[in-house]
Amino acid sequence: MSLSVKSPRSLRCLWRGWRGLSSQGGVMNVFDRSMKRRQKQWASSLLDSDKYDYLRDEVGSRLADRVYDVSRSLPDIVERLFLTDISDSSLRNRKKCEMPTQCVLADEEFLPFKENTFDLCAVLSHNINNTKYPVVVVQIHQVLKPDGVFIGAMVGGETLYELRCSLQLAELEREGGFAPHISPYTAVTDLGNLLGRAGFNMLTVDIDEVQVHYPGMLEVMRDLQGMGESNCAWNRKSLLHRDTILAAAAIYKEMYGNEDGSVPATFQILYMIGWKPHESQAKPAKRGSANVSFADLSKISKFPTDPQKS
Amino acid sequence: MSSSNVWSRSRARMRLFPELLAQCSGEAAAYGKCVASTTTGKQELTKNMCVKEFEALKSCFQSAAKKGVK
């Protein structure tokens, strides 16, 4: 991202590609955090690990667009950029950037930053493991300055529904029952609650769908593994029968395949923007202070009378 | 990795899977149609409901694997 020198105020950014989750009292511990870290380490140690970055690059560029769209007078110089991640080898693999960057190996639940440190926090969590989002969002709210902005992207409810359904049907037909192979996702309706409870104002949530076409089901699974997104829930089954894989691949192609033989995989990305409260932000108007009525809406198409017409 | 262990061998076997499956596209489509029809019909999908189509697919797959993909 190229920035122009305009204001002397500096911008401190926190850019997080966070993965993995840990336990905390009162919140369900669904995912095995150390397994997730091992998966991320393995994925970034692959020789061709940047082959699997296409989804992250796409979501990252759409997220960066939203950073540009934030129309508040954010300072134009990025003084320092902090990159945090749960796996140190993916931090080492990062691309070079012209902003002065600092890498922090951090657990998203215990951000090692003082309160009120950051102007902007951009979180790209395109990984599928996100039940600890409430805790993370509260942490982010704390480290942001008042009137700081949080821009996040995460995968939502309809992601990989083709894979999920094919595996479910295959296991049902072959084995008589099925186990969850795909992590649960957040629905878009829950996001507003989540951010509101954490204390963010002026929320904006929107949905984007990225559909990627693959030759077959196994390529989908191999790419997910290469991205470091393999299942790490505690209740995961440790094996998938050969017959079930065969059955699921046949079902996937038959139910969802395209004419040219490829199969689609859908990633539903939810983007959200929230602001830490500050006096300068617009507040809801007081009850009873309205001076126009909805009934006047029909008059909008008429020209307004010019009061200075003589 | 220079050494060959069970993980690299099983990954190599899995890499052949798509090509072998491509040789049995007819049987795969028949099996897929059988399962897909249960999602729209009144009866629920139970175990071995499409066992005939699956056995045909599996034997085609196994013979393709025996012939070997060189």
Image (cartoon, rainbow, N blue to C red):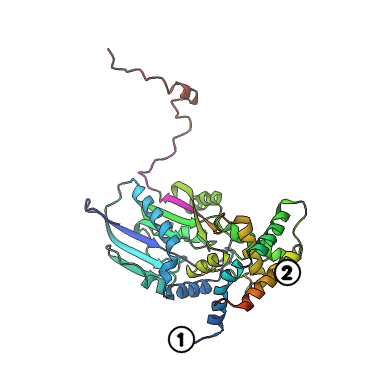
Viewer-nearest residue: A19 or A1: A1
Which residue is label 1 attached to? B2
Rate crowding at label 1 as few (under 14), some (14 to 19) or many (20 or more) other CA atoms within 10 Å: few
Viewer-nearest residue: A3 or A56: A56
Total number of numbered discs in the rendering: 2
Residue B61: quadrant of the picture = bottom right
Image check: A40 left or right of B33?
A: left
Q: Which quarter shows the C terminus of chain A?
A: top left
Which residue sits furthest bottom? B3
Residue at left offset 40%, top offset 58%: A60
- On screen, residue A272 above or below B19: above
Can residue A112 be seen here? The reply is no
Image check: A6 left or right of A267?
A: left
Residue interval drawn in magenta: A267-285
Residue A83: quadrant of the picture = bottom left
Can residue A2 be seen here? The reply is yes
Point out residue A253 in the picture as x, y percentages from the top left corner. 61, 60
**Does residue A64 show up magenta in the picture?**
no
Point out residue A163 in the picture as x, y percentages from the top left corner. 59, 61
Which residue is label 2 attached to? B55
- On screen, residue A85 above or below A207: below
Tell me the chain of label 2: B
Point out residue B67 in the picture as x, y percentages from the top left corner. 62, 77
Viewer-nearest residue: B45 or A296: B45
Q: Are marks 1 and 2 in contact (CB under 8 Å)?
A: no
Residue at left offset 47%, top offset 25%: A297
- Alpha carbon of mark 1 to alpha carbon of mark 2: how far? 38 Å
Q: Which quarter shows the N terminus of chain A?
A: bottom left
